[in-house]
Each structure stands twice: as C-alpha cells, then as structure tokens.
C-alpha cells in the first residue's frame, strides 16, 4: 500500500491554519510526521484527514490517537 504525503503548506491549506501552526502541532506531538532525508517534515494524508474529522466533530475523538514522537525517515521504508 502506497502512502501519500503532504507538505506543511498542503496541510495548512487543508486545515485552514498557518503553516507555522502545522509545525507547532508536529513539534508538540499532535500531528505525526515523517522526516525526509533532507530534514523536511512530510505528513501522511490519512493522519491529516483523521485529525480534520476530529476537529470538525469532537464526538469522533476516539478515531484519532496521535503517536508522540513518530518521526521516521523515508530511508527507513
């Protein structure tokens, strides 16, 4: 199964927040990310979509469980 990744700008556009907010959420462990070999963060589309659903409907909070410290490099796949 191929994963689809989003950039910080893509996530910010989807969530209608500042790119700096996306970075802060990633640093705080609210939004899991993958590090590229160049040190850039990329976000798994499925994780972002789950978080958007929770933000729109807090009743679905059990569907989203952030993984603290989930940082992988693309080289580890």
Image: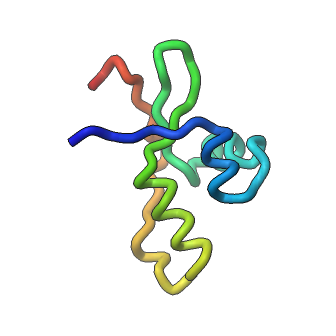
Q: Is residue 71 above or below residue 77?
A: below
Q: Residue 29, how many percent across, how many down?
A: 57, 48
Q: Quadrant of residue 64?
A: bottom left
Left or right: 57 as drawn, with respect to 65: right
- Between residues 71 and 10, which one lies in front from this camera angle? 10
Q: Quadrant of residue 15?
A: bottom right
Q: Residue 19, how many percent across, how many down?
A: 74, 42
- Residue positioned most to the top: 38
Left or right: 77 as drawn, with respect to 6: left
Left or right: 70 as drawn, with respect to 55: left
- Residue positioned most to the left: 1
Q: Quadrant of the N terminus?
A: top left
Q: Residue 18, how many percent across, how many down?
A: 79, 48
Instruction: Give the mark count.
Output: 0
Q: Is residue 49 above or below residue 55?
A: above
Q: What is the image's colouring?
A: rainbow
Q: Residue 40, how many percent across, how many down?
A: 58, 23
Q: Quadrant of the C terminus?
A: top left
Q: Quadrant of residue 73?
A: top left
Residue sitting at 54 percent across and 73 percent down? 54
- Between residues 30 and 21, which one lies in front from this camera angle? 21
Residue sitting at 45 percent across and 49 percent down? 45
Residue sitting at 71 percent across and 44 percent down? 24
Residue sitting at 33 percent across and 40 percent down? 3
Q: Is residue 40 above or below residue 6?
A: above
């Amino acid at each position: 199964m191929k994963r689809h990744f989003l950039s910080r700008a893509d996530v910010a556009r989807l969530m209608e927040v500042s790119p700096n907010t996306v970075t802060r959420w990633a640093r705080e462990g609210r939004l899991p990310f993958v590090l590229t070999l160049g040190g850039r963060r990329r976000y798994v589309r499925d994780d972002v979509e789950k978080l958007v659903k929770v933000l729109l409907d807090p009743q679905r909070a059990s569907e989203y469980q952030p993984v603290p410290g989930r940082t992988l490099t693309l080289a580890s796949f």
